Amino acid sequence: MKEPTIATTEFTFSGQTDFLKGSVRDIYTIDDKYLVMVVTDRISAFDILLPTVIPHKGQVLNQIAVHNLNATKDIVPNWLISSPDPNVTIGHKCQPYKIEMVIRGYLTGHAWREYRDGKRSLCGAPMPEGLTENDKFPEPIITPATHAESGHDEDISPEDIISQGFIPADDYQVIEDYTKKLYRRGSELAQKRGLILVDTKYEFGKKDGQIYLIDEVHTPDSSRYFYADGYEERQKNGVPQRQLSKEFVREWLIAHDFQGLDGQPAPDIPEDFVRQISERYIELYEKIIGQSFVPSASGNVLSRIENAVTKNIQNL
């Protein structure tokens, strides 16, 4: 029997004042004060929404994010109020900074591609000579990106963030400090589970003069993980690292002549690879949370979500 999936939602909740369909999340604003974030099973890569949904992906992303928001709330206030359904988070509406704070502990992904092409700094952060792919940086580097409403995010330096008015200088220093502390905590939590938090991104917003951590935290959509076991030996032998992230999806797409460039049609993902993607997400859930994944109740998934949210927002 085919696994139930959530491709899209079209709810109308009491007090609803706005609705935004993101690449993966459907976001409902309640009374201009709260956000109801429904995490669907859509998947994107290269900032492009792919035409295929992945069973259980939304539940995995949402539950990992909730887990890590709770695990980091002593570092920085966050937007989470409750999670009334496995695919839903309800939280404070903040004014978001349109910058993603990307932090990298290892030379991989985008940073490696830039390094391989001869660059030795990224967003103003120096990258030492003599490194190979997946080597650990002496210290994590912060490589922010603009958070585009559509199209591709772009690298940006801290100086340009401030000079172009994305974030005031005082707030940027606070956010950069939060980013380092969050990455340190995420790395510690990953290490306990036999993983390496390779790189990740954080988003921040402001409400009533207070900076909040918003959106997802340490999920496979926002982060890259290596298995710690065998990392050193693989580096020594020049063997690709075993990783849990969306990078293997990007690699499959590249192999099928898609990198999100203008005019490139996104390929359909075959059923066997959809199943592999779903299994990877579940595997990461179990590694990060340390518990077996329990799929949410099947049946009418949209009615389940609508009922849970309706009951919850009555108490906001």
Image (cartoon, rainbow, N blue to C red):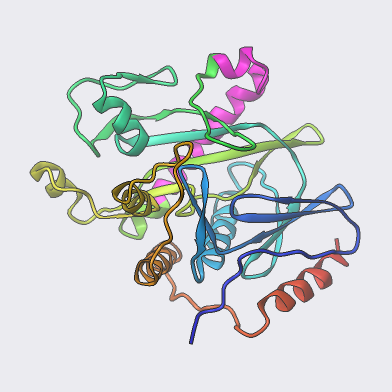
Vertical comparison of 230 with 172: above or below = below
Q: Is residue 171 magenta?
A: yes
Q: Is residue 298 left or right of residue 27?
A: left
Q: Position of residue 259 (x, y in %)?
A: 40, 42
Is 122 on the left-hand or right-hand side of 5?
Answer: left
Q: Looking at this rendering, what residue extends furthest in the left direction? A: 237
Magenta region includes residue 195: no
Q: Between 34 and 170, which is closer to the camera in this rendering?
A: 34
- Where does the image place residue 136, in percent across and percent down from the top left? 26, 36
- Vertical position of residue 307 compared to residue 229: above or below: below
Q: Nearer the viewer, residue 25 or 173?
A: 25
> What residue is rendered at 66% in x and 22% in y?
166
Q: Position of residue 270 (x, y in %)?
A: 38, 67
Tell which of 262 and 120 is nearer to you.
Answer: 262
Q: Which residues lie in the magenta part?
A: 160-188
Relative to residue 242, is residue 175 depicted above or below?
above
Q: Main secondary structure of the magenta part?
A: helix
What residue is shown at x 42% (from left), y 55% (from top)?
267
Residue under the point 45% across and 41% down: 260
Q: Is residue 256 left or right of residue 56?
A: left
Total numbered labels: 0
Point out residue 59 in the picture as x, y percentages from the top left corner: 56, 67
- Image: 159 above or below 6: above
Identify the image quadrant of the C terminus.
bottom right
Looking at the image, which residue is at 44% across and 47% down? 223
